Structures are given as structure tokens and as C-alpha cells.
Image: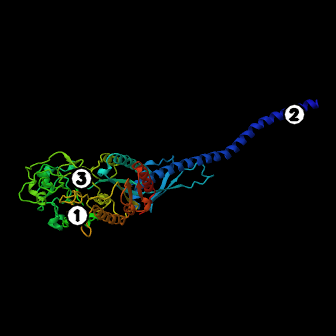
Amino acid sequence: MRNLFSGLRLTEFLASGARDQRGVSAVAFAISFAVLTPMALGIFDVYQTTDQRGKLQDSLDAATLYAARSASTTNAQIDAAGDKALGANLQLIQGATLQSSDFSLSGNKVVATATVALPGLAPMEYTHSPITVTSEVERDGQLEIALVLDNTGSMAGTKITTLQTQAKILIDKLVTAAQRSSDPNPLKISLVPFSSTVRVQPTTALSGANYDTTNHTGPNIPSWIDPQGKAHHAAGAQFDTFDVQTDRLTMMRNIGASWSGCVEARAAPYDIQETAPDSTVPATLFVPYFWPDEPDTSNAASNAVNDYLTDGGSGLTSTQKEQRSAKYSTTPSWRNQTGTFMSGFSFGPNAGCTLQPMMRLTTNADAVKTAIDGMTAIGDTNIPLGLMWGWHTLSPIGPLGDGAPYNTTHLQKVIILMTDGEDTFTTRGANFNGSYYSGWGYIWQQMVSVVPALTTSSSMTTRTAAMDARLQQLCTNIKARNIHIYTIRVEVTSGSSALLQGCATRPEDFYDVTNVANLGVAFDSIANSIANLRLTH
């Protein structure tokens, strides 16, 4: 009986224990809930904080880049631009608030800070300090690049087609590099094709029919153009190509022509200076290119070439016949109204002015490439005039004034000068002019300023040396403005490379390309060099 009783007590004890186990589980669950819930909430809190931090950082980075790319130049402007972008892009979780944001300039950098306050899910267990993130973007500098490219007759064929291809590749590389910039206008390019002159205005914009012969003005005729050639007469009437001070554009209009947009070099010392044109100082203005009608071949010394009008008059010397302005009447007597001479020069006052017009500084790289495709080869080599107009395109001073001011922070101005020949002022044997007409006029006009002055009997060596002397001083003047010069000499088999090497900013910025097929290598090197320039000016 005792054993039976004992067994019954044990069973009851076990049964009651089972009933009590349910209570223990409830207690254990309550204890676990009290411990694990804050832990779980804390884990979610950490996740939420991390998520908000990432969103804040992404938005701040984007806003800082936006501010850097803006045209803002003061802290207040930068802060306004950054705040605007941050407010538009920031995603906040429920209950979060943007406490503060600040964008400011630090040298060439835009520095930003933003703080967000978060709601807490386990405030008794975890502190909830605001989230603060920072961002920094360096504002890349601006580049203004002038491509000064030889378009002389010797460039015809493979040379100019290779130049066109490689110059466009160079532009593409510069554009690709600029796309990584935070500056709103990181790259501007100008183009100056040159030979014996430079075409500064397109013909399509210059209608002779609309020219005002009284006021010497016309649509699209710049105010810095001197149709009357006042500078020549200021130097002395004997240096003018016409017998009286007359309006060249009026004479063109009279014979039914329009100015094609080419110019002569300015009178010294302005031929190698960026002095702004001033109507009260005629030598600072630019005389339109006008190749005079040379005397009828039966009346002239040998080698008259651009003979397009009948001279008229009687008892005149060859010089007087050439300078006779009266023959440019509204009823001209033509000798050669159409046709060509000297391998592609069209008869008339614009002979030799069939160059591709230059392009002023622009952000439109595709337009520059299109202009490069239009380049043609004609004429002799006048490097100083081409380089001078390359400088004009970058200068903040007239005649164009397109360049940003010198010493602008983080601005670099660059000229890439490419030529395949030496400076040339071709002789003409027995012809009384002593040279062909060009951007230097005729040699007897003494527009190349040297001592002693050039004359019709000056040798080619003397002429080249005189032009080189102007080029050397021009290079010095440009570099004094902190403009970086690269020079390329392509397949030049005569003369010395010292002039162009000395023109370059550094010895390594000169490229002597012995085979035009390697022109692309030179342009590649220049593109890399430009990319490495630290724009901290």
C-alpha cells in the first residue's frame, strides 16, 4: 500500500510540475521580451541611422558638385546654390529633420557640411546624436585655347588632311577631359587658320551693297576696321597702295565686290601688341586686305600677276597706274573678272583671301571641328600675323575682347601654334613691287618694322630674318601675359628650329615633327600636358 501511495504522490507531483512549467515560460518570455525588444529596436535604429547617413551623404555630394559647377563667386552665392540643390534632393526618413547645412569657398574648393536629427526607437538604451556629414569638391580651372594652324600652299594634300583629322581628335580629347570638370564653362576654343593673311570676318556677313560710303560703316563691318587706310597715310603717303586716301570698301562696292574679311597687319609697334583699337590713333586700327589691280602687263615691269582692271590714264608710270584709285569706278573696265592666277588665286582685290575664317572663342567644340574641315591651303607663310590673331582671340582687350581677364583665378590661356614653313615675303624678280601683296602689304610699304628697313632689293634671307625678329618679340610679349605656348614644326627641312623652340613656353613644349604622319603623337602629348597643367593662377 505504501508503494502504491508513494507512486500516486509522485504522479501528482509531476503533473503539478507540468502545470507550473507554463507559468515559468510566461515569466521567461516576459523577461526575454524586456531584454530583447530594446536590442531589436536598437538594431533597427542603427540600420535607420546608417540608411539616413548614406542618403544624406549622397545628397550633400551632389549638392556640393552643383554648387561648384555654378557661376557663384562668393560664399553667400555658393551657400544659396548648395542649399537649393540639397533641399531638392535630400530624402529624409519619417521624423527626421535637416538641422543645418553650410556651403563655402576655401581657395579653389567648395566645402560643405550638413546635419540631420533622427527620431529614436530606443531612446532609453541608445543616444541619438545628430548625423553630420561633409563633402568637398575642387573647382577645376578654365581653359581658353587658341589653335593657330598653318594653311599655306605648302600644306596642300596629305599635310592639311592629316592636320584636320588630328586637330579634331585633339579637340575631342580636350572636351572629354573638360567633362570631368566642375566648372560651368571649363573649355573655350578659338581657331585661327593663317597663311599670308588671316580672315577675321566671314564673307557672308559682308555685303558691299549695304556699305555706307559716306560714314565708312556697314552691317557687320567692325568699328576697328579702317577702310581708308589712315595708318598708311599717317606713316607717309608714299607708303599707301593708292594715290589718295581712299575708302577700300567703297572701291570694292563700286566694282561689285565685297570685302572677304581678311586684314593687313597693324603698323609697328602694334603689329605685335594687343593694344586696343582707338579711332584717334589710326595705327591701332586694322586695314582691310585689298590687293590692288596691278598694271596691265603691257605697261608694267615684268611679272604683273593680279591684273583685273584696265589701268586708264595716260603718261603714267607703272607705280602710278597701280595706285590709280579712279579706275575702281561703278563702271569698271575689266581685264580679268574671272579665272585664277598663281595656282588658285582668284583675280580681284580679295586674291589670296580664300582662307577658312577664324573662329572666336566658343564653347561649341563641334562648330570648331566643322570649321577645321573647311580649311584650305593657299598663300605664303606669315607666322607673326597668325600668332597675333591667336593672341587677339584670347585677349580680354580689343579688337575682340572675348578672353577672360588676365590673372583670373584658376584660368589658363593656351596657344597651340603649328606651321610647316619659315616666314616668307616672296621676291618678284624685276617687278617694281618687289614682292607679292600679302598681310604685310607690299615690301616697299615697309610694314615689317626693322632697321635698316626692307626694300624691294632685300634678299629672301633678309626678309625672313626681319619677320622672324617680329615673331620672336611677339612670343615674348605673349608669354609675358602668362599665356602658355606650344609650337609644332612639321616637315621643315630648311632654317633653324631655334625660333619656334624659343617661342614655346618650355623646351619640351616644342615639337619638331619630321613626318606629318606623326602629327597626332605631338597633339596627344600636348593634350596630356594641358591636362596636367595646374590651373592655380
Residue annotated with mark 1: 457
CA–CA distance in space, label 1 to label 2:
144 Å
Name, please, the residue furthest toward the bottom.
451
Amino acid type, residue under disc 1 in the picture: Ser
Q: In this rendering, is residue 154 above or below 323?
A: above
Q: Is residue 262 visible?
A: yes
Q: Which label sits in the foreground, 3 or 1?
A: 1
> Residue 81's x, y, as percent?
40, 55
Of labels 3 and 1, earlier in sequence is: 3
Q: Contact (CB < 8 A) between labels 3 and 1? A: no
Name, please, the residue furthest toward the left.
314
Q: In this rendering, is residue 167 above or below 225?
A: above
Amino acid type, residue under disc 2 in the picture: Arg
> Residue 204's x, y, as percent?
21, 47
Q: Is residue 178 visible?
A: no
Residue annotated with mark 3: 201
Task: Report which quarter residue 273 is drawn in.
Answer: bottom left
> Residue 272's x, y, as percent?
29, 64
The quarter of the image holding the N terminus is top right
CA–CA distance in space, label 2 to label 3:
120 Å
Residue annotated with mark 2: 9
Of labels 1 and 2, earlier in sequence is: 2
- Decide which of 188, 465 is in the foreground and name it: 465
- SS assignment at label 3: loop
- Decide which of 471, 493 is in the foreground and name it: 493
- SS assignment at label 1: loop
Of labels 2 and 3, earlier in sequence is: 2
Amino acid type, residue under disc 3 in the picture: Gln
The quarter of the image holding the C terminus is bottom left
Q: Contact (CB < 8 A) between labels 2 and 3? A: no
Task: Report which quarter residue 244 is drawn in.
Answer: bottom left
